[in-house]
Amino acid sequence: MKSLTPKQRLTLINKITLGSKVKPTRRVWIPKPGTDEKRPLGIPTMEDRALQALVKLVLEPEWEARFEPNSYGLRPGRSCHDAIGAIFNAVSQKSKYVLDADISKCFDRINHDVLLSKLNTYPTLRRQIRGWLKAGVMDGKNLFPTSEGTPQGGVISPLLANVALHGIEELIMSLAPKFEMRDSRGHTYGLRDKIKSISLIRYADDFVVLHEDVEVVKLCKVEIEKWLSDIGLELKPSKTRLAHTLNKLDGEKPGFNFLLEFRLNKDENGGLRRTRATVKERMRVKNKPIHSLNEQ
C-alpha cells in the first residue's frame, strides 16, 4: 500500500466493495528454515488485500470473543510468551505426560465447506470469502485451482485458520468424563477436577496436551486425529511425540521443545527447568513469515 500515491489510494477506496470480482493470488516460494523444503505463499492483489483487511475488522471482534482461552497464535494482544507461561503454570507443580504435536500443512489443507460453515456469516460476506478461497493461484504463468486451504500471505488467512481450528480445546474438555482418575484415598475425581487436570495449549498449528496419566494423553491424541480429519487436516508424524516432563518414556528424552523458543527439561536436582533456545534457533522462529507478510 505504501507504493500507492494519495490519489491512487482514493481510487482504491472507491473500488473496494463486497461482491467485487476476486483475482487469483500470486504464488511465491520461500525457503523453509532448517530444511531443504520451500513454503508456498499466496500474495493477493492490493485491492483484495485492502478488502480482506476490512472484512477482518468485521469478523475479528466476534471471533475474539468466542475463541478458546488457551489459543495464543496469530491473535491480537497474544504472543508465544503467553503460551509458554500457560505451559509452565500447567507443569510447574506436578510432572506430566505431554503430547507435543504439529498440524501438517495447516494453511494448505483446510476444508473450505467446513470453514464456511463454521463462519456462519451472512450470504454476501460468505460469497466474498468463498471467492477468496476458490480464486486459484498463479505460479509463474500457470493458473492452478485452490480446492482446499487458505493461502499464507493473505491478510485474513490467520483469522480463518484460527476459526477452522476453533473447538479443539472444547473437544479435549468434553473427554473429561471418560478419564479414570482416583485420589490417594481411592475416591473418584469429580468432573470439575477432571477438567482442571487436562491442559491443551495451542499456538497456531503447534499445540501440547498435558496430563498426569499417559492413557489420557493417548486418548486425546486419537480423538484429536479424528477431529482434524473432519476438516481435512492431520498431525505431522515427524513433529509429533509423546514424552514426559521428568522421565524417559519409550526411549524419548524427558522434556520437550515448544516453538523452538521454550525448553522444559529436568535439572540436576530432578526438578523442572525452563530454558530458552539458542540464538540460532530463536532466529529461525523470528524468520517465520506468517506475521511479517500478513501485517503489511
Image (cartoon, helix red, strand yellow):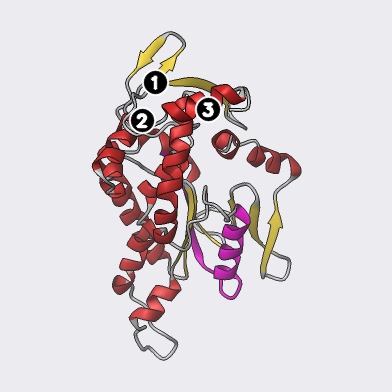
Q: Residue furthest top?
A: 141
- Residue at 75%, 43% (x, y): give it: 279
The image quarter containing residue 248 is: bottom right
Amino acid on which the number 2 mark rests in the picture: Trp
Q: Nearer the viewer, residue 31 or 273?
A: 31
Question: Count the marks: how many?
Answer: 3
- The spot of residue 240 in percent (x, y) is 47, 47
Where, quadrant-wise, is the C terminus in this rendering? top right
**Image quarter of the N terminus:** top right
Q: Secondary structure at mark 2?
A: helix
Q: Which residue is mark 3?
A: 10
In this image, 148 relative to 243: left or right? left
Kind of residue indicated by mark 3: Leu
Which residue is the site of mark 2? 132
Front residue of this view, candidates 242 and 178: 178
Is residue 103 highlighted in magenta? yes
Mark 3 vs 2, N-terminal side: 3
Mark 3–mark 2 contact, CB under 8 Å? no
Near-viewer residue (227 or 64): 64
